[in-house]
Amino acid sequence: MTSTAPFAAPPTDSREARYRALHDGLRAFPAALFQFDPRMREGWYADRYFVRTANTVAFDGRDPVVQMQVFAKQHGIIAGVYEVIRMLQTQLARHPVSGRAYTIRDLSVETLVDGDPLSPRETALLITGPYLAFAHLETDYLGVLARRSLVATNVRRVMDAAGSKPVIFMGARHDDWRVQTPDGYAARVGGAGSVSSDAGGAWWGASGVGTMPHAMIAAFGGDVVAATLAFARYCQANEPDVKVVSLVDYHNDVVRDTLAVARAMHDTFGPGSLGAVRVDTSERLVDASLAADAAARGRDGLTGVNAELVRRLRAALDGAGFPDVGIIVSGGFTPAKIRRFEREGVPVAGYGIGSSLLGHNDGESDGLLNDFDFTADVVMVDGRLESKVGRGFVPNARLVPLDLSALDLPDSHG
């Protein structure tokens, strides 16, 4: 399992350091990277009432300068800040009546930094400027912050549970392909060092990791050994940096198949040629090596990838002379299950986790979030406090002001 350098959490003890972190991060994420749909500027992605609000205000001859305050309702890790700023840079509106094109220089922005911890009701972003310039973007920037922060927060909870063990973010197959790249970035903000697709690592220069799916074994007629040897030959010829990890639960007999693969790899390619095996046993099944135990005391605790199965596999590998072959587990892992494995000292080398990080989970019982909502409120109009009751201005000393001169941002749209 390969990984890249971990995401650098923003500093907390120095305003100057936080200023540098924000602007260095923005320089690494130019607007073109996000490939914004130009229809965003016209309000095509906006909840329609925001567009109608802007049109109504303009029709009445008003052009108020507002301060928009954005906050979340959960504890978590914020992600998506750079994307939101680049959205404000490139997707501001034209005045509905005069046709004047607003630019980022019409706004003042103060924000937290990607990777910052966030508390409920804490102000995460302040945007000050002509309301008509960015009214149509409220749907879009709240959605960006919500999705990115959900993934980043859930991944951070997994990383905290796993300790020093590597984690592969395998969420790509569990959602629309169009969110692979931003989800992969959010996973990196949360601490994941590896993603499963090239698209997932595109914003931070990483390639997808992983070795073989069950489909590869099927293509070799269900022969796990033949598939693994063929994969090893391919890697040696074409991707020599890829560590061979064999998927060993195809026949629901991981001990037998693991030992067969380990011996064949050793005999064919020499010691150390098999980096690890991955166990992905279905939660509905009891592995063959545990069948007698299940018959004697029931299936409880013996289905899927469980502690006893991993321990039995580790003992078999060690006993056969393969202590250097690691065991990677996937399928149904959450922070709660990972913490249990780590607390019990289950000999796992790494974890692969997918759908639960995207909100497909049982919530706090899994130690994860199902959603991460952000809200935006006008808290000031033309220099005076103005807000809905209970949603007034909440100052936050951690916010960092966006310095346009430090970024040399153009005024042009697009």
Image (cartoon, rainbow, N blue to C red):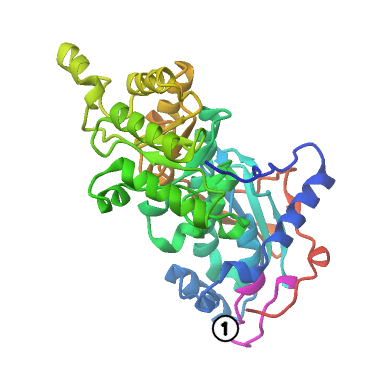
Q: Amino acid at mark 1?
A: Pro
Magenta-drawn stretch contains 146: no
User: Magenta: predominant secondary structure element?
Assistant: loop
111 vs 343, left or right, is right
Image position, residue 40 (x, y; %): 52, 74
The reply to whether the magenta stretch includes residue 90 is yes
Q: Is residue 71 above or below residue 85?
A: above
Q: Is residue 20 visible?
A: yes
Q: Is residue 83 left or right of residue 248?
A: right
Q: Is residue 115 left or right of residue 147?
A: right
The image quadrant of residue 395 is top right
* Placement of the C terminus among the 4 image quadrants: bottom right
Point 50% across, 78% down: residue: 39
Q: Quadrant of residue 222?
A: top left
Of residues 196 and 112, the one nearer the viewer is 196
Image coordinates of residue 356 in percent, x first then y, are: 39, 41
Q: Residue at x 81, y 45 (%)?
A: 17
Magenta residues (range): 88-105
Count the marks: how many?
A: 1
Looking at the picture, does residue 111 appear above or below residue 88?
above
Q: Residue at x 30, y 41 (%)?
A: 224
Q: Residue furthest top?
A: 296
Outermost front residue: 267
Q: Which residue is mark 1?
A: 96
Question: Residue shown at 36%/35% (left/top)?
Answer: 261
Task: Give the answer, above or below, for where 158 lies relative to 71.
Answer: above
The residue nearer to you, when weighing 221 against 341, is 221
**Secondary structure state at the residue bearing disc 1:** loop
Count residues near mark 1 (Cα–Cα under 10 Å), then give few for <14, some for 14-19, many for 20+. Answer: some
Query: Residue 150 placed where, x, y %?
Result: 49, 46
Residue 386 in view (yes/no): no
